[in-house]
Image (cartoon, rainbow, N blue to C red):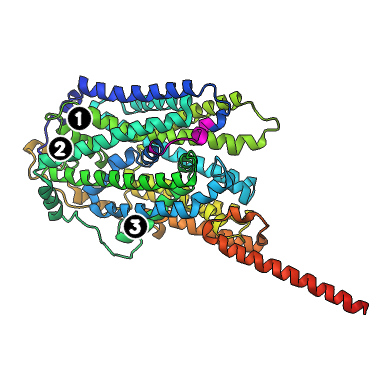
Amino acid sequence: MDGSDDADGSMHKSFGIIDCAVFAGMLAISAVVGVYQAYKSRKNEDAVREYLVGGQNMSIFPITMSLIASYISGITILGFPAEMYVYGTQLWCVVIADSFVSLTMAVVYLPVFYGLGITSSYEYLNLRFNGVVRFMGSAIFLIKMLLYIPLVIYVPALAFNQVTGMNLHAIAVLVCAVCIFYTTLGGLKAVVWTDAIQTIVMFGGVIVIAVIGTNQVGGFSEVWKRNRDTDRIQFFDMNLDPTVRHTFWTVVIGNYLNWLASCSVNQAMVQRCLAMPNLRNANITIAIMAIGIITIVSLSCYTGIVIFAAFHDCDPISTKQIKKPDQLLPFFVMELTESIPGLPGLFVAGVFSAALSTMSTGLNSMSGVIYEDMIKPWLRIPLSEIAVSRLMKLTVVLTGILCVTLVFLVEKLSGLIQAGKSLASITAGPLLGIFTLGMFFPIANSSGALVGGLISLNLVAWISFGTQAAISSGKIHFPVKPVSIEGCSESLKNHATNLSVIVETAIKEQPFFLYRMSYLWYTWVGFLTAILVGLLVSWITGLNKCKPGDEKLYTPVIRSFLRDSTTITKQEQETVVELEKMDRSETKD
């Protein structure tokens, strides 16, 4: 595709009445669902359980769609195509890791939560350790969501700005206002059903763009050929160097733990699984979710190589038609609008759907965590169901407003996928480490969990923020795949930047080793630090001793070992008692 001199003007004009109708329709449906669910559940006696876990009687379809929508934010829709275009297809291998995560969840983590009958995953930390560790876990989760949601809001605002020219921050406020409205009114059921609708819109948008784009380029074989000719098709880079940004090992093994942390112990995900009536249905939901996520990630990755095939001889970044790689997909959509009226509206609706679902999930789960883990334990007199419901709704509004204000910081970050996973890893590793410490190591005590979690959190935060600072200042550069401007018009060629000069002047000195480490290893660093420090501190302060009935606190994987050790302990105690009796009888004689 050739660039146009008046790219901006053409893009802004092409968002017409049909596009506005498609986009407005999606927002209106989301708002109506919120109002309907609020009306439907207005007389429910257990308002808290209804608001947080939908009365624990929801069906598989909406929960599955909600789980997919919660994981697939706008970061995936815009970030993966940009990654494929700039760095090649190595990141596509994340789907291998994703396929194993659902199995781990079903076998290791979910049975513990269901067996205890809890509504917040952080209640487990209180039962296994104490209230302080529970508070720390909840605080880490809140930090995670407050770091992540602003990034999720920024993505659709960026896309909307690209296709309409509207002010980015004004759009962000609009997105949040709609999301806060239906999340506040309808609780989990509103979130889940709007997620289901938004997932369908999201899939529809991505599929339509991929199919039309492939047809425009000349078919799948031409798409593949143009990417192969520029070395973009790469799946099995077996380099063991941990500082290489993407290799097979970093993408599969590194991302496995990253996604496991996001799904298995994250309240936003666990809350939806607990809304199922039983563990069997929850496991079915998790399996279907894995298939859905693999499909949408693969579609997004494929869209990235389609975009490169379309712009293989006229790179829009080099010619300054767009400012950042994250704008590639919106720009590509606008190039297709002449043939398909309403396509920009469908695209924007899809990206907004991905963002709204993630934000609504985050707001709903944050309100639950704040009340269940931070307010309720300190109440001397229990609040009425109506008072609790109003308190959680107020919490949704306040956290939503806070997220909007943090959007202004997101613009400073570079690369959606790397920024998103780097920030998520700050909390993902420590949280997964604390839960795993509790479920797998009966000897671990509350002091170990607390110290391990705090040290792990601070270590990964230092690495993550240090790396982002080094990237922003130009100290770290990642090798990119070649692009061309040979097919551009002369006026666009004159705008092109000499990229090689920029790279040469940016690299002055090698940053600290941990800053150069691939961002996909951050979760592993946090996870292992939390466990190892936790075990060391537990050993120093006095190992935890299992009591009868504690088996439910541990994963089914090690319960059989616990029963054996408990049996041995009882036998030893009985032997000691018998020996003491024999000693007494001998003394009497």
Residue located at (35% from left, 52% from top): 98
Q: Which residue is mark 2?
A: 212
Q: Are marks 1 and 2 in contact (CB under 8 Å)?
A: yes
Would you call the spot at circle 2 few (<14 residues within 10 Å), some (14-19), or many (20 or more)? Answer: some
Give the Cα distance between marks 3 and 1: 34 Å
Q: As shown in the figure, which amino acid type bears the numbered disc 1?
A: Leu
Q: Which residues are magenta?
A: 50-61
Q: As shown in the figure, which amino acid type bears the numbered disc 2?
A: Ile
Q: Which mark is first along the chain, 2 or 1?
A: 2
Q: Which mark is first along the chain, 2 or 3?
A: 2
Q: Quadrant of residue 214?
A: top left
Give the image location of residue 113, x and y in percent.
54, 47
Q: Using the image, determine if residue 577 lies above or below residue 327.
A: below
For the C terminus, give its image quadrant: bottom right
User: Residue 252: which numbered mark, if any?
Assistant: 3
Secondary structure mostly seen in magenta is helix
Report the side of 133 relative to 393 (left or right).
right
Give the Cα distance between marks 3 and 2: 30 Å
Residue located at (9% from left, 38% from top): 2
For the N terminus, give its image quadrant: top left
Decide which of 253, 422 is in the foreground and name it.
253
Is 39 in the magenta?
no
Report the side of 356 relative to 231 (left or right).
right
User: Residue 343: which numbered mark, if any?
Assistant: 1
Would you call the spot at circle 3 few (<14 residues within 10 Å), some (14-19), or many (20 or more)? Answer: many
User: Residue 387: which numbered mark, if any?
Assistant: none
Local secondary structure at mark 2: helix
Give the image location of residue 402, x and y in percent.
47, 31
Q: As shown in the figure, which amino acid type bears the numbered disc 3?
A: Val
Q: Is residue 406 visible?
A: no
Local secondary structure at mark 3: helix
